[in-house]
Amino acid sequence: SEVKPMGNENLAFKYSNDIYATRKQVSQMLGISNIDKFWNDIISYRSHYTLSLNLRNIERMPINLVLSPKILDDLVAKERRLSKLMVKFGKLNDDDYVKYAVRNNQYNLILTNIAQKYHIDFSEGLLNLIIGGNASSLTPSQNILLNYFQALHHIETRFYDPIDEKLLRTLLGYLLPSNDENIYRKEEIEDSSSRIIIDRIYSAAPVERIVPMMNDLFDFLNNNNNCPALAKAIVAFYYVMMIKPFDFFSEEMATLLAKYVLAHNDFEEPSVLIDFECFINDYQEDVNYIMKEVNKTNDVTYLLTFMLDKITEHIDNMSSSIEVSNSKSIEKEFFKNELDKSEPKEKNEKKHVEVVESQEDLLHNVDYEVRVALPKLPIGLDERNANAIAEHLLEMKPNLKRGEAQFYARHCTIGKYYTIQQYKEMNECAYETARTSMDNLVSEGFYQKEMIKNKKYVYTPIPRK
């Protein structure tokens, strides 16, 4: 086991491994205002694990990345999780429902962040149409979502292209079509030259520094083999966010480039589905705050440690969704086979329900006391009848999972509202699986999804022909 040093060296270890603390954080945690001695020891400790990136900031000072023992172990472990996710994806066929559900869910998260960032009116149905390639009659603002999705799809299918200016021109072309050969910004942002005199921090790179700095970034991404891929992606995100090299969509280009770096470094399709977009929407304030610290210290490790945890959440969520869906499918198939084997050939017991000779007879034997979504659905279903209706739905809609058909057959009264929790309890599955299944029923036109006051989603049946 690793032996931790004592005294000030122990503090240096703690605040560079257990938590990668800023000077202000160390002062607060120690309750001491003057921490010069402690901080010098921390900086000295970190210098032993500093990786040279060959990247410089706007003032031409070197940008550092500190891979202390625990941070490096954490990076390696999280890359291993991403590798396992890629293997799981590789085992799924393109038409596999599990792959469709995970992909659809992640793209919904991604496009929701973009829509919220630009205050675009949208619905989950609209996002599903965009993801499915069926969107039409979009407003100009909604076109941003379609354009961004097309850029993502390019990365998903063309991640082997070199990382260079041509790649950026292609990606930016989806977001902002232009015939201009020069893709970079031609105007200064917030008069950076005078801003530096005030607080010594640029708000963006001066125009004349954009091309050389971007060329340095390409060189780093293509040639620095000592830096783990996840770290490279986060450094690329930071560098583009710092430079702001484009007139429009610099933040989006930072997220797209980060995804491309991962995909290009053998992590392929799952890289595109990681919600880097949360860093320019949900966590934008946190990212801006941390970037100020990075700009002051030239240490991008502060941003690395923050982003890693969020990225890993998405990796784990996708991985869990695949595992739960696969295990549930195996479990249901097993029990179905066992029930088939144990079904008695002769039924001697008296039944308290009317035996319906055929499914067609069942579907026509209707009591219309309650208005239901299906025009030929009997009211007061017992288990036998409900199962027959579910089988009918599966034959009519092969994209449905058995659990989805079973749930809908029992929950399709017009005017009623059903929840993910009800699906979860009925099918005894994970909440994420239940949510994905209910959303699939929405996309298949069985339910309409609505949000009530406490930001909880409910589902109400849509009348079907």
Image (spheres, rainbow, N blue to C red):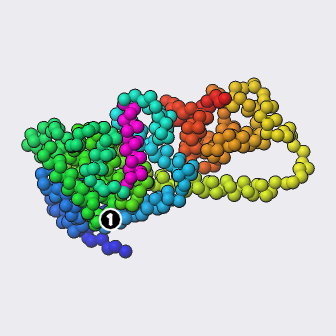
Residue 295 visible, this angle: yes
The answer to whether residue 122 is above or below residue 52 is above
Which of the pair 300/210 is nearer the observer?
210
Direction from residue 319 to residue 465 in the image, left or right: right
Q: Which part of the image, by quadrant, shows the C terminus?
A: top right
The image shows residue 131 at horizontal and vertical percentages of 47, 41
Quadrant assignment, res 248: top left
Residue at figure coordinates x 49%, y 30% from the top left: 453
Question: Does residue 145 belong to the magenta stretch?
Answer: yes
Q: Main secondary structure of the magenta part?
A: helix
Direction from residue 339 to residue 292 in the image, left or right: left
**Magenta residues?**
141-159
The answer to whether residue 84 is above or below residue 356 is below
Circle 1 crowding by C-alpha within 10 Å: few under 14, some 14–19, many from 20: some
Residue at figure coordinates x 49%, y 36% from the top left: 134
Residue 287 visible, this angle: no
The image shows residue 450 at horizontal and vertical percentages of 53, 31
Q: Which residue is mark 1?
A: 72
Question: Does residue 311 belong to the magenta stretch?
Answer: no
Residue at figure coordinates x 27%, y 58% from the top left: 221
Which of the pair 316/144 is nearer the observer?
144
The image shows residue 74 at horizontal and vertical percentages of 36, 63
Direction from residue 339 to residue 239 in the image, left or right: left
The answer to whether residue 365 is above or below residue 100 is above
The image shows residue 429 at horizontal and vertical percentages of 60, 49
Residue at figure coordinates x 87%, y 43% from the top left: 351
Which of the pair 291/7 is nearer the observer?
291
Callout 1 amino acid: Leu
Q: Which part of the image, by quadrant, shows the N terminus?
A: bottom left
